Every structure is written in structure tokens, then in C-alpha cells.
Image (cartoon, grey):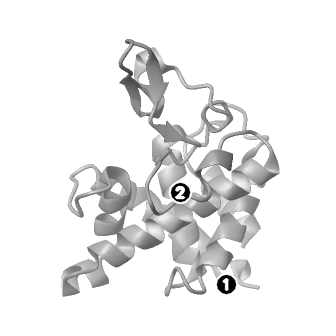
Amino acid sequence: MKAAILAAMLALPHGESTAHYPAVAEAIEAASWRASGDEWKHPAEEMAAALVAIAYHESHFSMRIQSGQCRLLQGECDASKGRGGQMYPRARSMWQIQKTYVVMDDYAGIVGASPEALHRAAWAAALVVAHARERCAVTTWARQHWEVPTLSGYATGYTCSWRRSWGRRATLRKALAVIETPQSRP
């Protein structure tokens, strides 16, 4: 599935170097298979497509952001002002994960360019995706059309209906079409 994830990533518009894409694809694959047990009761390919779409929309797979080098004055990484007026990031990694009870255990190690940090970040993002899907699948429509409620829940942390999720859904479906090819299955 790694090759299919990489193909899905490369099919999206990209500006900076793509040299790190294979490492990101590997982390997404590992998190998707790991989550497809207890955390995610759905095909691993759906998780992989969700992680591709989220990382693309949150940071365009940026290793600068994954490494914690956010441009806070430009609002990257959900920049916020502290009590003393200093800026700090509220979100970490290329998946822009905020610290919640869902990712408390993995949060400290999700920043960095190392393969370990990428794997921890992809796993933390998978946990948030799985939680959002479970929390937002409250109606028949939401269960059948899981992408928008899940992406909304991931992005906002509180609502399952966010209008910007429709664009993310298109990216997810594009990625899923590539990842679900018969060649991507083990």
C-alpha cells in the first residue's frame, strides 16, 4: 500500500521538494494498518486516504512544519498569543494535531524530521481521525458519507459539520481512488 499512498501524494499539487514523501507514505501506511484493528473498524485504505488528505490540506506535507518550524506571525500551526504576548503553536506536525485527551500519550514526540517522529505523528493523527469518525457517525447519512463528518470533526475538534470539509473530501476521494487499486493490496 505504501507505493499507492506515495502515488496519491504525488498526484496532488506540490511545491517544495518531494524527497521526504516516501518516508511520509511509510508512516501513513504503518498508522493505517495499526489503526485498522481496534481503533478503526474500516478498511486501512480509508484511513490512509484520510491521512493523505489531512496532511495535504493542513501543511502540504511540509517537513518544515513537521519539524516545528512554524511561521507563527503568519498564523501557521494555529498560532496563538500567550499571556506575555509571545506567540506559540497550538498544533503540531504536518497533520496539525492539537493536544487533546485522544493523543495525550503521543503528543510530545510528534514533532521532528526523524522517521520515529513521522510515525508517531501519523499514529496520533490516525487516533484523532478514528475518534472523529466514531463521534460523528450518529446518523445514517453520516455513516454512509463518513468523509465530511469525519474531516469536520478532525479539523474543528467539536463540530461534525464544517463547510470547508467538502474540499478536503474531494482530496480524500481522489487519494482513495489511487490507494484502493488492486495493486495496492498485500
Give the residue type that dot 1 points to: Pro
Query: Toward the viewer: 67 or 90?
Result: 90
- Numbered disc in front, either 2 or 1: 2
Q: Position of residue 141 (x, y in %)?
A: 20, 81
In the picture shown, does residue 70 fall above or below 92?
above
Q: Quadrant of the N terminus?
A: bottom right
Give the residue type that dot 2 points to: Met
| Residue ID at (80%, 51%) | 115
Q: Residues within 10 Å of mark 1 (few under 14, many from 20)?
A: few
Q: Secondary structure at mark 2?
A: loop
Q: Does residue 49 appear left or right of residue 170 in this picture? A: right
Q: Position of residue 46 (x, y in %)?
A: 51, 75
| Residue ID at (22%, 59%) | 159
* Residue 175 visible in this rendered orientation of the protein: no
Spatial CA distance of label 2 from label 1 is 36 Å
In the picture shown, does residue 29 fall above or below 76?
below
In the picture shown, does residue 37 fall above or below 45?
below
Q: Position of residue 125 (x, y in %)?
A: 54, 59
What is the count of numbered marks? 2
Residue on which disc 2 sits: 104
Disc number placed over residue 91 in the picture, else none: none
Residue on which disc 1 sits: 182
Q: Quadrant of the C terminus?
A: bottom right
Q: Disc 2 or 1, which lies upstream in sequence?
A: 2
